[in-house]
Image: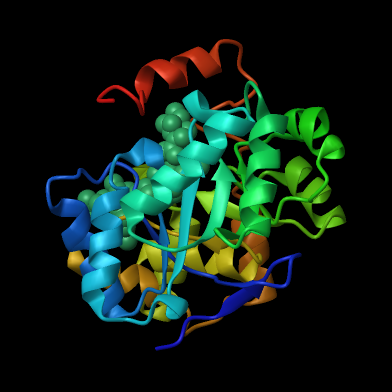
């Protein structure tokens, strides 16, 4: 099954659904999950240097036998590598770990510190053909206003937390103005049971003969949002992808829109968040 694509503001077409790899360990599990995802039809993989699993992602892609041009690969620059020179080196290192000649989409993973220097390095890498599209992640309206007006190139995406309980209306208005696509991280609320068991979601699932995850992903897709749910279970890997063969009506979309609680698990504007993240993910710990 061919998955739909979404056109970015730089002209590239990204598969609307991909496979997320956060918290899948590098003990063979990432290799196995990505291999299974590709085998069942995913053509878009989301990874990051801070997930410590780029090498297994790259190996699974290589061993899949699928032509490189048919797979969209996203990776991300972590906080220790901001600034022009460090970012330039980090991009080459990610390419090396992935075993790829180019990355389709590369993101500023967390927007703190020398973001302008990192962005210039990403623009240069794009120019050099090492990256096809560049974007940002975890930019709130406040952080967007701090950095993006000075960027020479507009980001193609902002990858932020999004699910029916956290619909990011203020940010979406800004992104729409610039034709920047929203990518949803944690599109299933990281398995949030109250969301998955919400009566609005479960009643629609029963109506369409789908599961709750499929209804949530379909809602997000119909909102024009790019998703990449993560799972290490083959049945879920398959069912999450199989969420494009039914259509929610405008009234049903309105019902899910009404579930918004503007409630996320992560607040990028919170004081001290940069240090918390740096402590949690030290990408040079083993250098
Ligand atoms: N830019 C950023 O800062 C961030 C980016 N991301 C990216 O976004 C991706 C997706 O977000 P993620 O945080 O993984 O969260 P998701 O919303 O994709 O949820 C993943 C969790 O939900 C469970 N799950 C998967 N499918 C189903 C289903 N159909 N029904 C019920 N439970 C299900 C999984 O369990 P199991 O594996 O056991 O099936 C896992 O525990 C990440 O993997 C990563 O690539 C994520 C966080 C932050
Ligand atoms: O998973 C990611 O990509 C992250 O950046 C995480 O750090 C995420 O933002 C988080 O765990 C916040 O609490």
Q: Position of residue 127 (x, y in %)?
A: 68, 58
Above or below 39: residue 85: above
Quadrant in the rendering for residue 182? bottom right
Residue for point 48% across, 24% down: 80
Quadrant in the rendering for residue 277? top left
Q: Going by the image, does 205 lie left or right of 59?
A: right
Residue for point 12% across, 46% down: 27
Q: Nearer the viewer, residue 52 or 248?
A: 52
Above or below 277: residue 87: below
**Which residue is outermost to the bottom?**
1
Q: Going by the image, does 137 lie left or right of 176?
A: left
Q: Quadrant of the C terminus?
A: top left
Residue for point 55% across, 35% down: 87
Q: Position of residue 4 (x, y in %)?
A: 55, 80
Is residue 161 visible from the viewing direction of this image? no
Q: Position of residue 46 (x, y in %)?
A: 42, 55
Above or below 284: residue 58: below
Q: Position of residue 147 (x, y in %)?
A: 78, 32
């Amino acid at each position: 099954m061919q998955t739909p694509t979404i056109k970015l503001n730089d002209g590239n077409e990204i598969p609307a659904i991909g496979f997320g790899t956060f918290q899948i360990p590098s003990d063979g599990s990432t290799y196995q999950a990505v291999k299974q995802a590709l085998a069942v039809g995913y053509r878009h993989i989301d990874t990051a240097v801070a997930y410590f699993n780029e090498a297994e992602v790259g190996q699974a892609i290589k061993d899949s036998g699928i032509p490189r041009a048919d797979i969209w690969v996203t990776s991300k620059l972590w906080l220790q590598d901001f600034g022009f020179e460090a970012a330039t080196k980090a991009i080459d290192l990610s390419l090396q770990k992935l075993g790829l000649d180019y990355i389709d989409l590369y993101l500023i993973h967390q927007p703190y510190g020398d973001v302008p220097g990192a962005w210039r390095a990403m623009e240069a890498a794009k120019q050099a053909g090492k990256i096809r599209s560049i974007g940002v992640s975890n930019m709130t309206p406040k952080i967007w206003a701090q950095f993006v007006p000075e960027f020479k190139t507009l980001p193609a995406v902002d990858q932020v937390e999004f699910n029916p309980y956290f619909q990011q209306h203020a940010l979406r208005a800004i992104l729409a103005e610039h034709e920047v696509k929203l990518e949803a991280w944690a599109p299933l609320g990281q398995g949030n049971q109250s969301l998955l068991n919400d009566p609005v979601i479960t009643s629609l699932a029963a109506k369409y003969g789908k599961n709750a995850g499929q209804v949530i992903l379909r809602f997000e897709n119909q909102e024009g949002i790019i998703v990449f749910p993560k799972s290490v279970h083959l049945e879920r890997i398959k069912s999450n992808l199989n969420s494009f063969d039914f259509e929610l009506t405008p009234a049903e979309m309105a019902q899910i829109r009404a579930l918004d609680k503007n409630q996320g698990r992560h607040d990028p504007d919170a004081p001290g968040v940069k240090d918390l993240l740096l402590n949690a993910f030290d990408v040079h710990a083993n250098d």
